[in-house]
Image (cartoon, grey):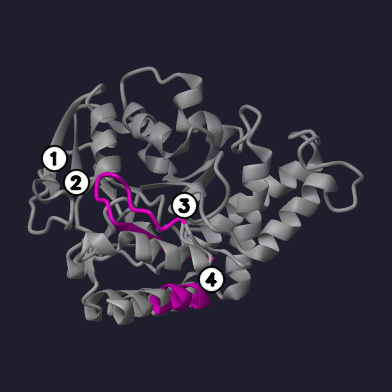
């Protein structure tokens, strides 16, 4: 039976990418060697890394604009630390919209003053703060564009003179934005780009080298820029599969094309959540994420019935995070409209049974 994968991460990947990646594990492009056993210094993998980095910049519209794309290790959680190590001299601003920004704030406090310019913790992060003031003199302002756990997403980004840093782990490459407004973007691959094991960092070169502290080599962005993202052995499979996914997206027509498909999926599911009395949405409507829809049953006594229908339909990965409970439908780029339609059919069946 076909499984409809709504997992929040590791994410669903295009079937064509999965097939090509699995073939490369056995034999990379007819070389007679597995992707997993070739030297990361070989011309074959150097070309893979270069292509992946170039594709990232191309899709974001940042080629020839003073940015470098890097594939690093440690996930987005390492970037909570690495961002502050490289950029925080005196004080930084953070918008606190959920678990991941909360963790980023904790790491940044090791290096300097952290100002929470706004927070939605008072209502369990069910909304995006608005109308907040960004202080002058910040080393940078840090945002989390999409909150996987709570199902909220920033729709309008603030204007500030401070460098703008954004964790885009769960909505990178999903919607059109003026990415040149951001000075540093980072995203764990496993949410919307590839398998776990690598993190994409896109950084404007001009913002680096301004802190007075000495930054260790493995935590210094400039180290990896100078070595073209290959200072140490990179995660070859994760980079290769991310490259395939980025090429898949480019062939579809890029971010503008996938944004239209993502809007259709979100509209279909949120319409059902709002119209079906068996379900209640979690996030404020104006702040709802296109990537992660959070909801619950209006009557918990129907839980066993609903989950039996989900299993029968082959729906996987719908359980919500313990912080919110209920259910979470992650509708990343590779998830089909058909899969969302199957989920909506199951929800409609619940209304008939109720």
- State the separation of the CA atoms marked 2 and 3: 21 Å
Task: Check disc 3 and report the residue beneath it.
Answer: 191
Give 185 or 287, whichever is nearer the viewer.
287
Residue ID at (20%, 66%): 298
Q: Do the numbered discs 1 and 3 sit on residues whose CB atoms are within 8 Å?
A: no
| First along the sequence among labels 2 and 3 | 2
Q: Secondary structure at mark 3?
A: helix
State which quarter of the image contains the N terminus.
bottom right
Q: Position of residue 170 (x, y in %)?
A: 40, 54
- Residue stretch rendered in magenta on the structure: 317-345
Q: Do the numbered discs 1 and 2 sit on residues whose CB atoms are within 8 Å?
A: yes
| First along the sequence among labels 4 and 2 | 2
- State the separation of the CA atoms marked 1 and 2: 6 Å
Task: Check disc 1 and report the residue beneath it.
Answer: 116
| First along the sequence among labels 1 and 3 | 1
Q: Do the numbered discs 3 and 4 sit on residues whose CB atoms are within 8 Å?
A: no
């Amino acid at each position: 039976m076909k499984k409809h994968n709504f997992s929040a991460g590791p994410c669903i990947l295009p079937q064509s990418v999965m097939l090509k990646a699995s073939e490369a594990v056995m034999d990379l492009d007819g070389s007679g060697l597995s992707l997993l056993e070739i030297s990361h210094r070989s011309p074959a993998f150097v070309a893979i890394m270069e292509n992946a980095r170039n594709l990232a910049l191309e899709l974001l519209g940042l080629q020839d604009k003073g940015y470098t794309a890097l594939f690093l290790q440690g996930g987005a959680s390492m970037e909570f630390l690495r961002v502050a190590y490289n950029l925080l001299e005196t004080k930084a601003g953070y918008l606190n919209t959920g678990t991941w920004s909360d963790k980023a704030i904790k790491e940044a406090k090791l290096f300097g003053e952290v100002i929470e310019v706004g927070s939605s913790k008072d209502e369990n992060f069910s909304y995006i703060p608005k109308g907040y003031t960004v202080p002058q003199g910040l080393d940078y302002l840090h945002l989390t564009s999409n909150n996987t756990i709570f199902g909220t997403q920033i729709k309008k980004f603030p204007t500030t003179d401070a460098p703008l840093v954004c964790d885009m782990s769960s909505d990178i490459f999903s919607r059109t934005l003026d990415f040149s407004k951001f000075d540093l973007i980072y995203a764990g691959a496993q949410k919307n780009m590839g398998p776990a094991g690598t993190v994409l960092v896109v950084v404007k070169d001009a913002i680096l080298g301004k802190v007075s502290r000495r930054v260790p080599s493995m935590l210094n962005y400039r180290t990896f820029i100078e070595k073209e993202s290959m200072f140490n052995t990179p995660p070859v499979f994760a980079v290769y599969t991310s490259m395939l996914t980025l090429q898949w997206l480019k062939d579809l027509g890029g971010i503008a094309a996938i944004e239209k498909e993502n809007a259709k999926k979100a509209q279909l599911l949120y319409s059902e959540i709002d119209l079906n009395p068996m379900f209640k949405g979690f996030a404020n409507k104006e702040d709802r994420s296109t990537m992660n829809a959070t909801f619950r049953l209006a009557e918990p006594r129907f839980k066993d019935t609903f989950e039996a229908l989900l299993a029968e339909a082959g729906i996987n990965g719908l359980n919500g995070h313990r912080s919110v409970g209920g259910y979470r439908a992650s509708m990343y780029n590779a998830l089909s409209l058909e899969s969302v339609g199957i989920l909506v059919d199951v929800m409609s069946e619940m209304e008939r049974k109720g």
